[in-house]
Every structure is written in structure tokens, then in C-alpha cells.
Amino acid sequence: MRLARHCTVLLLALTLGACGHGNTPDDQADAGASQAATEAPPPPQAPAAPTAPEPAANPARPLQASDLDAYAKGMQKEIEMRQAASDKAAKAKAANDQTAEITALAELTSVEVTEAGAQAAGVDRARYNFIKDTVDHVLGTSDMNAMMAKMGDAAQAQKMQSDPYAGLEPDLAAALKSRQDELARLRAQNMAVLMNAQKL
């Protein structure tokens, strides 16, 4: 019985060996050539022809007097949203809800505030940011001039001051001057909401 079992195992081994190694030399050569062709790297391709550079994006159109209304509407919306977020943060702090407080504080500087301001202003966000940056620069320069005028020698301070309306069209400069107090109050109020939130 044991001899018959050994013979059976030996027969299976020989059969499996024949199945795995029964290829002829020609078959093995063909298989090797096929594998080599499969593994061969692809032929080098010709470099792509250079393409013309993309045209530069058109710069934002200059600030116009009509943009001052957009600035005012956008600032009012930003103040509204930031004040609401600040109130939520204060309530969360009073309730000792740190997670809600942090979430509300994050809303103060979220992109949603800028997006809402742009929608209220009736312009896209890129244009709104341009309007804000330009008007804020004028208002900020005017504030800096006023601060320097109160410090030290008036003549020296005047030398250090810069013209906030430099480079602006005359009609735009006149419109800004006529609405400077109004726009400056909105800017200061918006900044105050942010500063007060930091004191919570």
C-alpha cells in the first residue's frame, strides 16, 4: 500500500513537471522574444512644438465714482455679518461653549463675509476686493496723514505726508473727498467689530 502511494505521488510530480516544462526550445525562444518586446521602452517621441504664451489678463478697470456706492453697500453687509458672528461668539463664551465660540470667531474673517459683501455691492468678488483695496488705501493714507499732523512739527509732518488721491481721476478724487467721512466711518466700524471680537 505504501509503495503504491509513493508511485502515485511520483507520477503526479512527473506529470506536473511535464506540464510546467513541456515547451520546446523554439517555444521558449518565441516567448522570450515576446516578453522582451513587451518590456522594451517605447520609442522616443519628438518634442512638442512650442505653444504661444497665454495672453495676460486684462487689468481691473480703474476705480470709478459709481464704485463708491458698491463700497458702502459691501461694507454695510460685512459689518452686519461680522457683528452677528461676534454676538454669537459672545453668547457661546458666556455659555462656556468653546467649540461654538471658536466657530463663530472664525466666521468673522471667513470668505463668506467677503462674498456676501460682493453680492450686496452688485459686483463679483474680484472686483469687490479691488474696490475695497483702492478705497481703503485712500482712507488709510488720509488717516495716517491726520495722525502725523498731530505729532511734532507741522512742517516736518507735512513733508512726510503723501497725497491719498494721487493717480486718481479728478472726478473720482472729488467724489471720494465728498464722501470720505461716510466711507471712513464704515471702514472704522468694520475694523472695530474685528477688534472688539478679539477682546472677548
Image: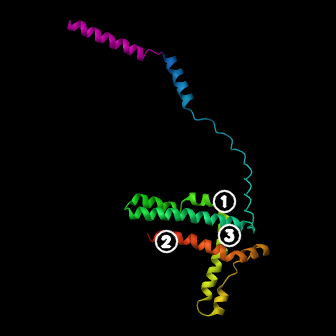
Question: Magenta segment: does it hold 56?
Answer: no
Mark 1 or mark 2: whose residue is earlier in sequence = 1
Mark-to-mark CA distance, 1 and 2: 28 Å
Mark 3 or mark 1: whose residue is earlier in sequence = 1
Q: Amino acid at mark 3?
A: Thr
Give the residue drawn at x 61%, y 71%: 186
Quarter of the image with the N terminus in it: top left
Magenta stretch: dominant secondary structure: helix
Q: Which residue is mark 1?
A: 126
Q: Which residue is mark 2?
A: 196
Within-10-Å neighbours for mark 2: few <14, some 14–19, many 20+: few
Asked whether the residues under the numbered discs 3 and 2 touch, taking CB atoms below 8 Å apart as contact, a structural biologist would say no
Write down the quadrant of residue 33 in the picture. top right
Q: Residue 199 or 83: which is nearer the viewer?
A: 83
Residue 20 sits above or below residue 187 on the image: above
Measured from the top left, where is residue 52 in percent x and y? 74, 51
SS class, disc 2: helix
In the picture, the disc for residue 134 is: 3
Q: Amino acid at mark 2?
A: Asn
Give the residue drawn at x 62%, y 94%: 153
Residue 165 shows up from this direction: no
Q: Amino acid at mark 1?
A: Ala
Mark-to-mark CA distance, 3 and 1: 12 Å
Q: Residue 107 or 129: which is nearer the viewer?
A: 107
Residue 79 shows up from this direction: yes
Magenta stretch in the rendered image: 1-23
Question: Magenta segment: does it hold 19?
Answer: yes
Measured from the top left, where is residue 34 in percent x and y? 55, 24
Give the residue drawn at x 72%, y 77%: 177
